[in-house]
Image: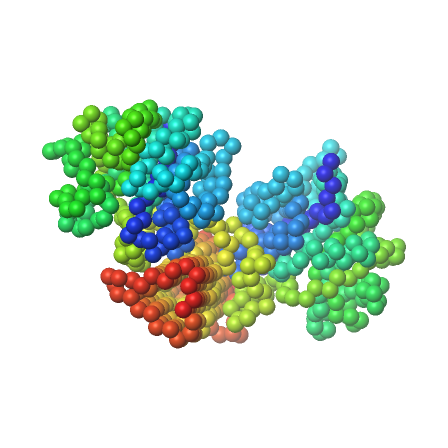
Amino acid sequence: MRQVMGLINLHEDDRYIQELTGNRPLAAVPFGGKYRVIDFLLSNMVNSGLNNVGILMPEKYRSLLDHLRSGKEWDLARKRDGLFILPPASERYSRAHRGNVEHLFQQLDYLSCVRRDYVLIGESHFVYNMNYQALFAQHLRTGADVTLLYKEMETAQTVVPGAIRLNFAEGSDRIAGMEISPWRSESRNLCMNIALLSKSLFLDLVNQAMSRGGGDFATDCLAANLNQLMIRGLRFDGCAARISTVNEYYRYNMELLKPEASAALFHPQRPIYTKVKDSAPTKYQDAAEVSDSMVANGCFLEGCVKNSMLFRAVKVQRQAQVSHSIIMQKTTVGEGAVLEYVICDKDVVITPGRVLKGDPNYPLVIRKGTVI
Amino acid sequence: MLKRECVAMILAGGQGSRLGVLTQKLAKPAMPFGGKYRIIDFPLSNCCNSGIYTVGVLTQYQPLALHTYIGIGSSWDLDRQNGGVYILPPYAHAAGAEWYKGTADAIAQNLNWIEAQHPEHVLILSGDHIYKMNYGDMLLQHVEQQADATIAVIEVPYEEANRFGIMNTDESGRIVEFEEKPRRPKSNLASMGVYIFRWEALRDQLLRDQQEENSEHDFGKNIIPNMLAEEARLFAHRFRGYWKDVGTIESYWQANMDLLDDQPELDLYDTEWAIFAVNPAQPPHYVGKDGAVRRSMVAEGCRIEGRVERSVLFYGTQVGAGAVVKDSVIMGDVKIGDGAQVNRAILAPGAVVAPGAVVGSADELTPLTVIGENTVVNCQTGGEA
């Protein structure tokens, strides 16, 4: 894997999750009790043996820089190689639907300098745990031009906004069609927006697309060249979550309360790294009643918490009842308050006695720093 | 040559022999504490928070875990261009090899290292005390009073004063007498084993102490009494707050239990004076559908399907369904099987309690039960340590 460089493209579509991306890119949305969305892809790359990772920064990336800093937590603070932050030259290029090829084009200097033969380019909003060695091995074995990772969905009908569906040539793993954000689709194959290809081909594709006016990597570099290139797929059979809507975000966080899902995502041999916070262990008081919940360090619990996920340094005061909710860092749930099907962003204060309820299919999102 | 105002020397070679099986393969400063810490996190974090960034750590007894833990000091922000953390085990000289024969000897054997730092003052610390202290305040007082040595003292109850080194001071705080474990203490100001010396004064003392054949090469027994006899300027620095030397299994257990109070004296949640530690990459802990946790501290990576009361659980511990854990300290990666019972016990890292097994007894008159590292308990174990 030392011949492969990682690229993380953060020009991701956050139109359906804007309640959580007001001040931050999708990649910086807190997930899984102590992580941010980007931690999973970044840790996967590092755990697979990649030690050169470039990150194409979207707009509003202050919180991401604060999170990544030197890359030390991912072992990417290196004298040679390591983490490279690639900021957008102008915010004009930064929205997903406006295309990210131009941003890649601006980084050609960096891309051509890196002494790696292959590029693994992915987007952060797929959350899973995988060693990419299997992807690399298949890529070399089949001699494909590009290898994409995909996941088979239970039904084709599930509406997944902004997703890419793959159609295979009969009886083979060669991709014959890519449907980008289809309105309706017969394909059950959901592309996981991660591609492995040789760096020379990658640079050619970016240059070509740029000469035709830029655009989007998946659309204008891959889908546009399906006939010229041998693009193959590798099916991913583990647990994977696609985070692009508030509903998906809520559902996949709750999924982690199930032992199988959390065992798959938090694989002991492939840990997920994140920024270290140095909080003390969580303290449970006499009145604490916590069940079926994930709790990070630094919380102070005196109330009742059920079927929920608590991020670091959350306070739940006496007689408060939190159920089916996601409570992010440093939020305080006041005495006797009731939260049901709620997503509380960071630093929220729920004053005593408030009752806030969402619906399983429409969780109530409380924005960062709100006092209710 | 970069001059430094103050370097710290942490004495971390102690065995903590009264901790028995817990320190069989571990220096006492490396003992886990408080759900995620090791005891040495306290002096190291105090140094970092006090702005002292050159720290020597003197190790000797079972140093492997300690060396691994400290690494290059990045967890305490002590990986520095200038200064940082230095691990200083005993080494062989041209004249032969010798162990550190006492606290003062350990410093004396590292004279060359201290000289190379060009310090004005040297802060001597113990690696096995639990407390939060701003050494900067103490240094300020030390410099203002133009002291040769400043000794941190804490008030202890008079009836316990005979267990400590007691300082008798005049109104200005100058130390006039030092008594090691006095039978009839004249004051209740106990030395915390935290000293700041003017380096020149200490250097002179150490060199002379090395020549003394009958010396035990100990700060409390030799260096301080000698300086007093020579009428050096020795001052006491009053410390108010939590300070604990966990010498025994009982006091180690009690110090952990103290953290479970409503407002523990030792506040680990204060972000202004954070205690830093090595943070393993563990997911949040999980409390199962039938799990229950009361009056406890739980670190990340744990999985609790049973009941936990008045206990401290370190990283990655599993408590099976129907299991009950009470009044216990469970160090990392312990597996407690379904239906097992753990009462008034200390379980060292990696211990395994088989399903249905019973460890310890709820009876407060029986001593605490201690299960060693990676030990498997299959049936009933209680009472004996």
Residue B222's image quarter?
bottom right
Instruction: Pick whichever, A88 or B198, lies toward us.
Output: A88
Quadrant of the drawing holding the C terminus of chain A: bottom left
State the residue in front, A179 or A320: A179
The structure residue drawn at horizontal position 66% and vertical position 41%, both measured from the top left corner, is B83
Describe residue B3's horizontal placement relative to residue B176 as left or right: left
The residue located at (73%, 33%) in the rendering is B94
The vertical placement of A12 against B225, above or below, is above
Tell me the quarter of the image containing the N terminus of chain A. Answer: top left
Nearest the camera: B242 or A277? A277
Q: Where residue B196 sits in the image (x, y, percent)? A: 75, 53
Residue at image point 18% right, 39% down: A179
In the figure, residue B305 lies in which quadrant? bottom left
Q: Tell whether A311 sits left or right of B121.
A: left
Residue A273 image position (x, y, % from top left): 42, 46
Question: Left or right of B169: which side holds A353?
Answer: left
Q: Is residue A186 visible?
A: yes
Q: Height in image: A223 above or below B62? A: above
User: Residue shown at 88%/57% (left/top)?
Assistant: B231
Image location (x, y in percent) of residue A320: 39, 73
Residue B313 visible in the shown view = no
Question: Please, which colouring scheme is shown?
Answer: rainbow
